[in-house]
Amino acid sequence: MSTEERREQLLDAVLKIIVEQGIHKVSMDTVAREVGVTRPVVYSVFSDTDDILRASLDREQAAAVAQVLPLMTTLQTSNDPATALLEYLDGFLGAVLAAPDRWRAAFSLVDSTTPKFRRRVDEQRKAAVALFEDYLRQAPIPPGTDIEMTARVIFTLAWEAGRMILSEPEVFSRRRLLTFARTIITEHFEPTGTPGD
């Protein structure tokens, strides 16, 4: 096995441990046991637990951004906010379902007792909210719309929908979540042709 293949194997194990046991259970020992190798094999690729955790989070964050960025790019080119936001939500749920362990780990980091990992997720949240704000400032939305609050509500709706579709898929189906979101979003974004401010 090449160094890169071993690295990916170990990072896959880290993700599995985070999802099944929690981030606090990740250690060089638990990763070695999960893969079925000795500790020196893990140490030959990563220097310590912080190093392997950082590498895992970097990999999953990059992959999550690669999934979501095209959705945000498409959103930025639409002049119909209700349709655009519903398409974004549908695409986001599709991304969550396509890589459930990645997103389970992301959702669990919000509740992590490790401040630096919570900060990483919070930074991504702020970046996503800022993109929603940028879109709303250019979109034809009702006059007087509180752009900052609306952007945060949209982000929270998508984030919680992602959590629910993974935690209780038999209760919160993709169709149910989108139907609910359509009701909220279409009521809020009446077509006015008036640019947001």
Image (cartoon, grey):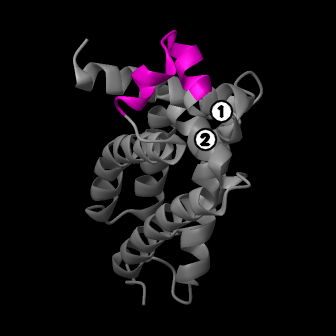
Picture quarter with the C terminus: bottom left
Left or right of residue 197: residue 175: right
Q: Can residue 137 be seen in this view?
A: yes
- Residue 1 counted in the magenta span: no
Pointers 2 and 1 in contact (C-beta within 8 Å): yes
The residue identified by callout 1 is: 165
Left or right of residue 176: residue 55: left
Q: Which residue is drawn at 40% across and 55% down?
A: 84
> Where 123 sits versus 36, above or below?
below
User: Magenta region, mostly helix, strand or loop?
Assistant: helix
Q: Residue at x 67, y 44 (%)?
A: 108
Write down the quadrant of residue 165 in the picture.
Answer: top right
Q: Which stretch appears magenta?
A: 29-45
What type is the residue that disc 1 sits on? Ile
Q: Residues within 10 Å of mark 1 (few under 14, many from 20)?
A: many
Looking at the rendered structure, the secondary structure element under dot 1 is helix
Picture coordinates of residue 89 (x, y %)?
50, 47
What type is the residue that disc 2 sits on? Gly
Picture coordinates of residue 13 (x, y %)?
51, 23
Write down the quadrant of residue 98 in the picture.
Answer: top left
Q: Residue at x 55, y 31 (%)?
A: 28
Picture coordinates of residue 74 (x, y %)?
28, 54
Looking at the rendered structure, the secondary structure element under dot 2 is helix
- Residue 36 counted in the magenta span: yes
The residue identified by callout 2 is: 162
Q: Nearer the viewer, residue 82 or 16?
A: 16
Picture coordinates of residue 88 (x, y %)?
43, 49
